[in-house]
Image (tube, rainbow, N blue to C red):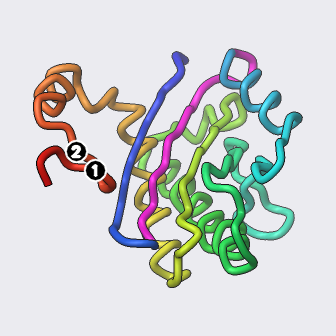
Amino acid sequence: MTIQIGESFVGSGPNAAHTNTILGDRSGPAGVAWASSLAAPRAGHVPFMVIAQTGVPCNPPTLFVNKAEIANDQHGLFTWGAAQAGVAAGVGEALRNGVIDPKKADELVIIAALWINPSANDEEEVFANQREAMLTALTNGKNGTPSVDKFMEASLNVSNPFFRIGK
């Protein structure tokens, strides 16, 4: 399998989810990156394995990499709680929907880099947005979307949730 790279942004305001994913073979570059990231935490950014329930990690093994340093107790709880649960639910849905072939799950790893806003204030919304963002990022990675043509068109009028030309 070639590495599949995906991205998704779901929701708005402090409970939005911005997710980047890498899906690839455990024995290839994705597996090396997965293991290296887990083994090399840095202050404020401690990657961890995503679980669906206590003692039931995601399969394929999924590494949660926080883009935002944990700012306070609530931010930590939303990161390790609702956002992690959303990732697990999204991976499960990707398996059930054929985005990831369940027969190959034991051969793969996922790296999920997530932005959880330190101002997040609704754990149910964080969960729902993260679930959808995870599934969408994995789907985009599988489909190779957006296309180069779509990107070139968008690059003529760039914007994102934090910046827009000529506001």
Q: Residue 27: x, y in percent? A: 75, 18
Residue pictured at 52% horizontal, 48% vertical: 95
Q: Amino acid at mark 1?
A: Phe
Q: Say whether residue 48 is left or right of residue 166.
A: right
Tell whether position 46 is magenta: no
Q: Are marks 2 and 1 in contact (CB under 8 Å)?
A: yes
Q: Residue beneath label 1, please?
A: 163
Span highlighted in magenta in the image: 15-28
Residue pictured at 55% horizontal, 18% vertical: 1
Q: Classify 10 Å Cα crowding around label 2: few (below 14), some (14-19), many (20 and above).
A: few
Q: Amino acid at mark 2?
A: Ser
The residue closer to the viewer here, 146 or 163, is: 163
Mark 2: which secondary structure?
strand
Q: Residue 104: x, y in percent? A: 62, 32
| Distance of label 2 from label 1 (alpha carbons) | 6 Å
Q: Say whether residue 40 is left or right of residue 63.
A: right
Give the vertical position of 26 relative to 90 (above or below): above
The residue closer to the viewer here, 22 or 78, is: 78
Residue pictured at 65% horizontal, 63% vertical: 84
Label placed on residue 159: 2
Residue pictured at 53% horizontal, 21% vertical: 3
